[in-house]
Image: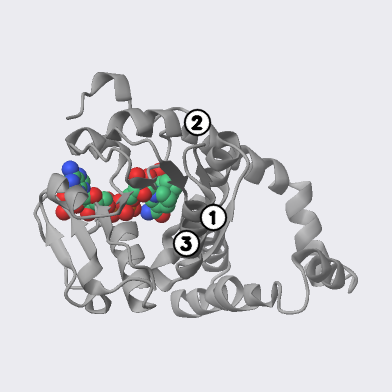
Amino acid sequence: MTGQTIGVVGGAGWLGRSIAAALVGSGFVQPQSMILSSRSGKLREPVEALGDVRVTDDNRFLVAHSDVVILSVRPEDLASVHINVQDKLLISLVAGVPLADIQLFTGGTRVVRAMPNAALEIGKSYTPWLANEQVDAVSRSFVQQLFATCGYADEVADEAQLDYLTALSGTGPAYPALLAQTLYHDALAHGVSEHVARRAVNGVVLHASQLINQGRSFEELLETLKNYRGVSAAGIEGMLADGFERSVSGGVNRAFGVAQSKLFDVHKTRQG
Ligand SMILES: NC(=O)C1=CN([C@@H]2O[C@H](COP(=O)(O)OP(=O)(O)OC[C@H]3O[C@@H](n4cnc5c(N)ncnc54)[C@H](OP(=O)(O)O)[C@@H]3O)[C@@H](O)[C@H]2O)C=CC1
Ligand SMILES: O=C(O)[C@@H]1CCC=N1
């Protein structure tokens, strides 16, 4: 357990309350050492796992009473966050805002960018993260432990990789949900009932996918299935021939472009 007090600006949101629930629920931090903020000063709905954590509408109060500040508001809401964290450890989850801009905006010296995904809600987020030079080895180890408590995590080499991974893994359920929806529509077009189509798609996307890394990698599974030279092979080869790789890679690269495009202009906003 950490002896640090952790504050989450935007702690009522999807990621903020999920991080808080994972950290409190695992015992990484005591509820009384966790502070969340939202504009209303309330959680939108009660989160049982959070116990009696403090919730405030005052971000400056949160910063004053926290050793570590996690910034978890949408890029377009950053302008409404008025904080000056100075030498406290600041961890930004905000997509599309570089370390240097976060540093300038929050007055922080020790700044980390981390990119979890929505699987945080079930304690299974993959979280790549990156720290600036002022973050020492002890704090880096703390950040790794914090995000390992929310799933699993890796420190990455540079900001370009973090932006790329925002597009690849930060998007979390987006691509599996798209695959599920595409398969569902195809099943409906073949006359399968909605009930059966949904169960069949869930059987593939939620359950069969769990065989990946249960003793076999995705490459091995694909090879094994292709070696039947039957139905699966035809499906896989048909999708590839119709541009599956180009479509997936094109989509991820468009998302990467947005992640790199600076979703918030720090120079238009003054902090104090
Ligand atoms: N969701 C995801 O899968 C991922 C999100 N991210 C990034 O994480 C950040 C948070 O995303 P997410 O949790 O999904 O967004 P949400 O909209 O669910 O949560 C953001 C929260 O910020 C609060 N908020 C807004 N302005 C302020 C303010 N001035 N002070 C205090 N709280 C404020 C809002 O609370 P209220 O309205 O009650 O004030 C809201 O609950 C975003 O920057 C996003 O880019 C990164 C990776 C994955
Ligand atoms: O879509 C978004 O902008 C945020 C960042 C990654 C996931 N959700």
Instruction: Identify residue type, mark 1.
Output: Tyr
Query: What is the x, y in percent for residue 167?
Result: 53, 44
**Labels 1 and 3: the sequence-earlier one:** 3
Q: Give above or below for 211 relative to 59.
A: below
- Distance, label 2 to label 1, CA atoms, is 19 Å
Instruction: Identify residue type, mark 2.
Output: Gln
Q: Quadrant of residue 263?
A: top left
212 and 145: which one is in front?
145
Element assignment for label 3: helix
Marks 1,3: beta carbons within 8 A = no
Marks 2,3: beta carbons within 8 A = no
**Residue 143 visible from this viewpoint:** yes
Q: Give above or below for 98 relative to 216.
A: above
- Along the horizontal axis of the image, is 7 left or right of 43? right
- Along the horizontal axis of the image, is 187 left or right of 219? left
Marks 2,1: beta carbons within 8 A = no
Query: What is the x, y in percent for residue 243?
Result: 72, 44
Q: Which mark is residue 147?
A: 3
Residue underneath mark 2: 260
Q: Residues within 10 Å of mark 2 (few under 14, many from 20)?
A: many
Residue name at image x 46 percent, y 57 percent: 117
- Along the horizontal axis of the image, is 155 left or right of 214? left
Instruction: Identify residue type, mark 3.
Output: Phe
Q: Which mark is residue 175?
A: 1
Q: Quadrant of residue 35?
A: bottom left
